[in-house]
Image (tube, helix red, strand yellow):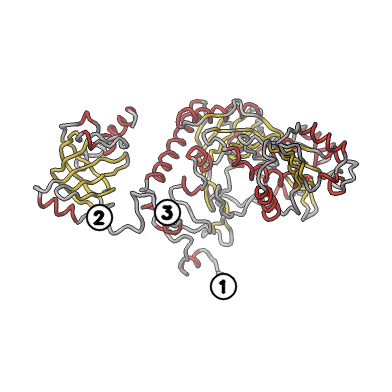
C-alpha cells in the first residue's frame, strides 16, 4: 500500500478498542510492537502445535499465530470457522527467512496472539471466499454480501470509488458545480420504458423515475449555473446485457454553457487522460481522440462504436461491379445498396475449416446467405467460389483498390447499405481475436456528424435518430430547406475499445428550431407544448447555447477494470431478469398499500 494511503487509513482508524492497526499495513518496521487487529478469518491452517490464521480486513491480510500454551484461546480457535469475525492482540515478530511470503505486502511479519475476542462466529459458507472457485451467478447474487468479500470483486468496488473520486476532483478544479436533480419526475414520451411511481396524494397520477437528468441539466444552464455535473442515478425498464444493467445505472452527467462541440471534447479528453495516468497502467492510443464521421465509421468499420485496436478496415468496392456480369454484385451496385470487402493479410493459406467456420458464423449469426471470398495463395493459385464470374478488369481493379498481395484473402458481402455495413462490422469483430488486441491500450474516438433524422420503415414516417433536443447543423435554415434525411446534427458518441461510453450533443436552445424539428418528426405545436412546455418556456426566457454528455460510470469502471460483465463492477446488481435475489425485489405489497394508492391489480393469468 502506498505511504499516502497508509497514512489515510491511520487517520481514519477507529477506536483502539478493536484495533490499533489495519491488517494490510503491518511491515517489518512494526516488529516488537504490540498491536490490536480486527477482521475476518480468511484461511486457517492447523500445524499441530500451532494454528495459523490469515486475518483479512478492508486493507489486506496479516498472518496471526496461536500457540498451544494459551489453552483456552487455542481451543476456541480450533473450532472457529472461516469468515468468523475476531479481534486479537499480540506482538509483531519477523518471520523466519524460509517462511517469508513474497506475495503478501505483510509477508515478512506475523502476529503472535496473546488475547482473542470472537465478535461473530460464522455459519458454514455457501461458497468459498478465499479461493476463486467457479460459483453460479444466482448463488453469488443471493449472497452478495459474501460475494463482495472476494478479493477481485472487493477490489473492483474500491476501484469504482477511486474513479468517481478522481472524476469529482478533476471537474471541481475546472469550475464544475455538482448539483442533484429530482428522482421523482414526470414520465417522458421519448426513450426507453419508464419506471412509474403511483402518487398517494394525487390518485390516478404517477411520477416517473428519471431515465436521465436530460431536461433538468438543460434547465440548470438556463438558470445560469454554467458548468454542471452529477454522478446521476438513472432508471430504465429495459432488458439486461453484458454491458448494461437492468433497472438502474449511474452516469457522469455533464452540461456546459457557451461551448462548442470542440470545447466539450477537450474536457472529456482531459478527464480520461487524468483517470488513465492517475489510476491505471493503461495508455491512451491517441490524444486528442480521433474524430470519425458517422458515415465513415459505418463504411470503414461497420459500426458506430468501432474498436480501433483492430487493424481490419472495410473497403467499398461497389463501383468496380456497376456493370459486372456477376449478377449478385451488379444488382447491389445501385443507390442504397453496396458491395463491401474485408481483406485479411497473410491468411490465404488457412485450412478449409477456417473459412467454413467464418461462413457458418455469417449464416447463423448474421443471417447472410453466404460469405464470398477470394484466396490469393502463396503458390500463386487463386481459390474462390466467385472468381470465375469476374472479368479480368474486375480482378485487376480489386487488386489495385485493395492493395492485395500474395497470401491475402478477401471476404465480400453485398446488399442494403446499413445491413451490409453491420454484417461486415460483425465479421471484422469475428476476426479480431486473430490480432491479440492489447487490453492495456485505450482506443478512444469520437463519432460525430450523426444524422438528425431517420426513416422508420415500420411506421412509414421520419423519426429522430438520436436526441430530439440536439441542434441541427445549419440551424433553422437546414430544417426549412434540406431533405430531412440529409440533415446532420451536433451529436456525438464517445467510444473506447468497441464500447459506447456515452452519447451527447450541443443542444437546441431556440424555440422556433425546436418546433420545426419536432414538426418534421410528426409532432404538432400543441403536442410539443403539452409534453415539453417547460422547456419551451425556459428557452423563451433567455437560454444560452449549451451542450453536454453523460458517460456511464459502470461502463467506465468495466473498461479500466478489464471486466466483461457489468455486474462485476456494481455492488448490489440485479440479475438479468431485473430481480434482486438478495432482498427479493421486486416483491408483492399489501392490500392496504394498494388501497392507499387507489390501485387495483389486473394481473396476467399466469401471475394470478
Which residue has dot 2 on it?
81
Mark-to-mark CA distance, 2 and 3: 21 Å
Of the image marks 1 and 3, the number of the one nearer the N terminus: 3
Which numbered disc, 2 or 1, marks the residue closer to the eye? Answer: 2
Q: Is residue 518 visible?
A: no
Say whether disc 2 or disc 1 marks the residue closer to the N-terminus: 2
Q: Check residue 75 in the rendering and tell me which mark sits there, or answer none.
A: none
Tell me, for residue 134, which label it has, or none: 3
> What's the distance in space between the residues labelled 1 and 3, CA to CA?
34 Å
Quadrant of residue 324 within the rendered picture: top right
Left or right? Give the position of 424 relative to 238.
right
Q: Quadrant of the C terminus?
A: bottom right
The one of 331 and 71 positioned closer to us in this rendering: 331
Image quarter hosting the N terminus: top left
Dot 3 surroundings within 10 Å: few (below 14), some, or many (20 or more)?
few
Describe residue 573's horizontal placement relative to residue 84 as left or right.
right
How far from the left and from the top, in percent, is residue 274?
A: 50, 28
Can I make out residue 423 in this image? yes
**SS state under label 3:** loop
User: How many C-alpha atoms fall within 10 Å of the one at disc 1: few (<14), some, or many (≥20)?
Assistant: few
Query: In the rendering, at what x and y percent does residue 278 appear?
Result: 45, 28
Q: Are marks 2 and 1 in contact (CB under 8 Å)?
A: no
Is label 2 in a helix, a strand or a loop? loop
In this rendering, would 366 be left or right of 154? right
Residue highlighted by disc 1: 606
- Residue occupying the far front of the picture: 379
Amino acid at each position: 500500500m502506498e505511504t499516502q494511503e497508509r497514512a489515510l487509513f491511520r487517520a481514519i482508524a477507529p477506536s483502539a478498542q478493536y484495533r490499533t492497526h489495519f491488517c494490510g499495513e503491518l511491515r517489518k518496521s512494526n516488529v516488537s510492537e504490540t498491536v490490536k487487529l480486527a477482521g475476518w478469518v480468511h484461511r486457517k491452517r492447523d500445524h499441530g502445535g500451532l494454528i495459523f490464521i490469515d486475518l483479512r480486513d478492508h486493507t489486506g491480510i496479516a498472518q496471526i499465530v496461536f500457540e498451544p500454551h494459551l489453552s483456552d484461546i487455542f481451543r476456541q480457535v480450533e473450532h472457529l470457522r472461516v469468515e468468523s469475525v475476531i479481534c486479537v492482540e499480540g506482538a509483531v515478530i519477523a518471520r523466519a527467512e524460509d517462511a517469508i511470503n513474497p506475495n503478501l505486502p505483510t509477508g515478512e511479519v506475523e502476529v503472535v496472539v496473546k488475547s482473542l475476542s470472537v465478535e461473530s462466529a460464522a455459519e458454514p459458507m455457501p461458497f468459498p471466499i478465499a479461493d476463486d472457485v467457479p460459483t453460479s451467478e444466482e448463488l453469488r447474487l443471493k449472497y452478495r454480501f459474501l460475494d463482495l468479500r472476494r478479493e477481485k470483486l472487493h477490489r473492483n468496488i474500491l476501484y469504482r470509488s477511486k474513479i468517481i473520486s478522481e472524476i469529482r476532483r478533476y471537474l471541481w478544479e475546472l469550475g464544475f458545480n455538482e448539483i442533484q436533480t429530482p428522482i421523482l419526475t414526470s414520465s417522458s414520451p421519448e426513450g426507453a420504458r419508464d419506471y412509474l411511481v403511483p402518487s398517494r396524494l394525487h390518485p390516478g397520477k404517477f411520477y416517473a423515475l428519471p431515465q436521465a437528468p436530460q431536461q433538468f441539466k438543460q434547465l440548470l444552464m438556463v438558470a445560469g449555473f454554467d458548468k454542471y455535473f452529477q454522478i446521476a442515478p438513472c432508471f430504465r425498464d429495459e432488458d439486461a446485457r453484458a454491458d448494461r444493467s437492468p433497472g438502474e445505472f449511474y452516469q457522469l452527467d455533464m452540461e456546459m454553457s457557451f461551448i462548442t462541440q470542440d470545447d466539450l471534447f477537450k474536457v472529456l479528453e482531459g478527464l480520461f487522460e487524468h483517470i488513465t495516468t492517475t489510476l491505471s497502467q493503461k495508455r491512451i492510443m491517441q490524444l486528442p481522440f480521433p474524430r470519425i464521421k458517422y458515415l465513415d465509421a459505418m463504411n470503414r468499420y461497420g459500426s458506430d462504436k468501432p474498436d480501433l485496436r483492430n487493424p481490419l478496415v472495410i473497403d467499398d468496392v461497389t463501383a468496380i461491379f456497376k456493370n459486372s456480369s456477376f449478377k449478385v454484385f451488379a444488382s447491389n451496385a445501385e443507390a442504397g445498396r453496396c458491395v463491401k470487402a474485408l481483406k485479411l493479410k497473410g491468411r490465404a493459406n488457412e485450412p478449409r475449416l477456417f473459412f467454413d467456420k467464418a461462413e457458418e458464423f455469417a449464416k447463423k449469426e448474421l443471417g447472410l446467405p453466404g460469405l464470398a471470398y477470394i484466396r490469393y495463395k502463396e503458390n500463386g493459385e487463386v481459390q474462390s467460389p466467385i472468381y470465375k464470374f469476374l472479368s479480368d478488369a474486375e480482378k485487376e481493379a480489386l487488386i489495385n483498390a485493395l492493395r492485395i498481395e500474395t497470401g491475402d484473402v478477401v471476404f465480400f458481402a453485398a446488399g442494403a447499405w446499413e445491413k451490409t455495413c453491420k454484417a461486415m462490422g460483425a465479421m471484422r469483430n469475428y476476426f479480431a481475436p486473430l490480432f491479440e488486441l492489447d487490453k492495456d491500450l485505450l482506443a478512444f474516438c469520437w463519432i460525430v456528424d450523426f444524422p438528425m433524422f431517420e426513416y422508420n420503415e415500420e411506421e412509414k414516417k421520419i423519426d429522430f435518430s438520436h436526441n430530439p433536443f440536439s441542434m441541427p447543423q445549419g440551424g433553422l435554415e437546414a430544417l426549412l430547406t434540406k431533405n430531412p434525411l440529409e440533415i446532420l446534427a451536433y451529436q456525438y458518441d464517445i467510444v473506447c475499445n468497441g464500447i459506447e461510453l456515452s452519447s451527447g450533443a450541443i443542444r437546441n436552445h431556440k424555440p422556433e428550431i425546436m418546433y420545426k424539428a419536432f414538426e418534421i418528426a410528426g409532432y404538432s405545436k400543441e403536442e410539443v407544448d403539452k409534453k415539453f412546455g417547460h422547456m419551451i418556456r425556459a428557452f423563451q426566457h433567455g437560454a444560452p447555447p449549451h451542450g453536454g454528455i453523460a458517460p456511464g460510470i459502470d461502463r467506465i469502471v468495466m473498461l479500466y477494470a478489464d471486466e466483461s460483465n457489468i455486474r462485476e463492477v456494481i455492488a448490489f446488481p440485479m440479475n438479468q431478469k431485473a430481480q434482486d435475489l438478495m432482498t427479493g425485489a421486486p416483491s408483492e405489497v399489501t392490500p392496504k398499500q394498494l388501497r392507499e394508492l387507489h390501485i387495483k391489480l389486473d394481473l396476467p393469468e399466469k401471475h394470478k
